Amino acid sequence: MGVADVITRGGLPYRDIADNKPQRIYVLYTISKILFGETILPIRILTVIVNVGIAGYLIALCRTIRKQKGSGWEVGVWYLLIAPVFQSQ
C-alpha cells in the first residue's frame, strides 16, 4: 500500500506510513488519484511534468550564473537523461 492510498483512506504520512520522499509529492499523488482513479498513468505524467519543470529551472539558473544566452541546456538535458534512472530505484 502506498502513501497516497493511506492518505485517501484518512491516514497521515509519517504517522501511519513512511517513505523517503517529501510530503508534498504525496499530496500531488493523492490529488491525481482522486481525480483520475487508480491508474499509474497520471502519476507518470505528473512525474514527467515535474522533471521538465526542474530541467527548465536548471537551465535558467545556469544562464543566470554564466550570464550567457544558449548556456545551461546541457545541464537540463543531462538532468532529463539521468533523473528517470534515479527515480526508478
Image: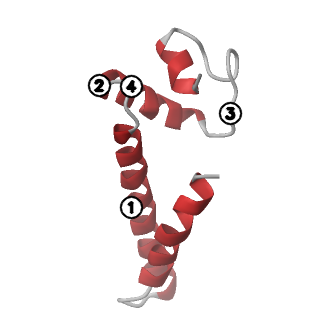
Distance, label 3 to label 4, CA atoms, is 20 Å
Classify 10 Å Cα crowding around label 4: few (below 14), some (14-19), many (20 and above).
Answer: few
The amino acid at mark 2 is Leu
Q: Of label 1 and label 3, which has the lower sequence position?
A: 3
Q: Of the residues under marks 3 and 4, which one precedes in the sequence?
A: 3
CA gap between label 1 and label 4 equals 24 Å
Whole-number angstrom distance, CA of label 2 to CA of label 1? 22 Å
**Label 1, residues with CA under 10 Å away: few <14, some 14-19, many ≥20:** some
In front: mark 2 or mark 1?
Answer: 2
Question: Of callouts 2 and 3, which one flags the residue occurring earlier in the amino acid sequence?
Answer: 3
Q: Which residue does the numbered mark 2 point to in the structure image?
A: 35
- Please name the residue that numbered disc 4 is placed on: 38
Residue underneath mark 3: 19
Q: Is the residue under label 4 in contact with that under label 1 (CB below 8 Å)? A: no
Q: Secondary structure at mark 3?
A: loop
Q: Amino acid at mark 4?
A: Glu
The image quadrant that residue 67 belongs to is bottom left
- At label 3, counting other C-alpha atoms closer than 10 Å, the crowd grade (few under 14, some 14-19, many 20 or more) is few
The image shows residue 43 at horizontal and vertical percentages of: 41, 40
Which residue is at the front of the view, 59 or 81? 81
Instruction: Report the side of 8 relative to 3 (left or right).
Output: left
* Residue at image mark 1: 52
Q: Residue at x 42, y 81 (%)?
A: 73
Total tally of numbered discs in the picture: 4
Q: Which residue appears at 44% of the width and 26% of the height?
A: 30
For residue 11, which quarter of the picture? top right
Rendered residue at 56%/68% (across/down): 82
Asked whether the beta carbons under mark 2 and mark 1 sit within 8 Å of each other, the answer is no
Q: CA distance from mark 4 to mark 2?
A: 9 Å
Front one among 42 and 7 = 42
